[in-house]
Amino acid sequence: MKASAVDRQGLAQRVSRGTTGQLWHRIRKNWAAYFFISPFFILYSIFGLFGLLFSLYISLHHWDGLAPMKFRGAGNYTELFQDEIFWISLRNTLVLLLFDFPFKVGLPLLLAVALNSKLIRGRGFFRTAFYVPEVTSAVVVAIIFRYLFDRDTGIVNYGLGLFGVENIAWLQDPFWAKVSFVLLSGWWSQGYHMIIFLAALQTIPNDLLEAAMVDGANHFQSFMRITLPLLRPIIIFSAIITTIAGLERFSEPFLLTEGGPGYSTYTIVYYLYQKTFVSYRLGYGAAMGYVIFVLIFVFSILQFRYGSREGR
């Protein structure tokens, strides 16, 4: 038995040496390829992996960026879950996210179906027009919407006034400020999702749709029974992207309302910014960042699993 154990140990060592030798031989043989891809891994290790691990370390400490760190353990996380403003920010974020889906998934899908139809003339122009907001700077978009939704001189209130509607405090009222965020985000991002759906629609074989028409299906039935099921993976992808963007919403409260009035337009990322870069509580902000990461991960997994299950 001792001899067989020794033999097994020797065999394992030889296999290990052989595997290591093959690895080094492969590296020496393909050194040029590894040399050219090495900058990505070096930069990722410095600015990505190191930052990820260091932020986790910071989340366990109290640190203002200058004074020595003070170990808190799970204190930052405990304080976070007892923070009323954090829960207000989370509620605002989830409410805005809920209303994002019709504008970032439903409406882009309908636009893609319309612009994929041969009945629409000038499709190239409309595709470009709907996609232009996606490549526009967030600062420019915010400035445009600030003028559009100004309570006294905004074009939106002027247009509504022609129908007898009184001026709406779009950016000063808690309810209407959220509506403004949803409209801005939907207008800004729908072109990206529309292009994704449009590309997916153009991969669906026309033979399937023609066969359905021959069998007596109308356009609506073909869309519901053929097109929509084939688009399910793309819809799941769009929903996940929308969820990630919604949970990371920052530009709107930062550029339009500064979180006001009160805390009515605070989002969790904006609150993270306030705690980290205004109050200089880097450990608390890092803890909040990891909570946001967990939320994104959980929501993404649930959407992916639910969508896959429905597709079976």
Image (cartoon, grey):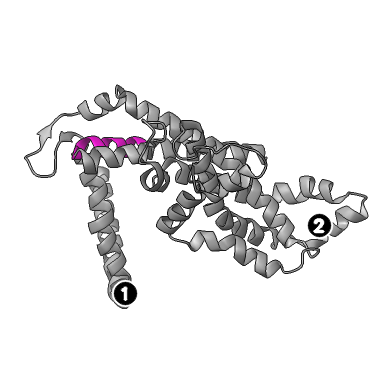
- Image coordinates of residue 108 in percent, x first then y, are 63, 52
Horizontal relation, residue 220 to residue 17: left or right = right
When the figure is inspected, residue 54 is found, relative to residue 18, above or below; the finding is above
Q: Is residue 284 magenta?
A: yes
Q: Amino acid at mark 2?
A: Leu
Disc 1 versus disc 2: distance between alpha carbons?
45 Å
Please name the residue shown 51% across and 59% down the image.
134
- Image coordinates of residue 1 in percent, x first then y, are 26, 39
Q: How many marks?
A: 2
Horizontal relation, residue 263 to residue 178: left or right = left
Quadrant of the frame with the C terminus: top right
- Image coordinates of residue 289 in percent, x first then y, are 31, 39
Asked where in the image residue 38 lies, by quadrant, the reply is bottom left
Pointer 2: what residue? 208
Residue segment shown in magenta: 280-291
Q: Nearer the viewer, residue 22 or 158?
A: 158
Pointer 1: what residue? 36
Residue 2 in view, yes or no: no
Asked where in the image residue 192 lies, by quadrant, the reply is bottom right
Asked where in the image residue 5 lies, by quadrant, the reply is top left
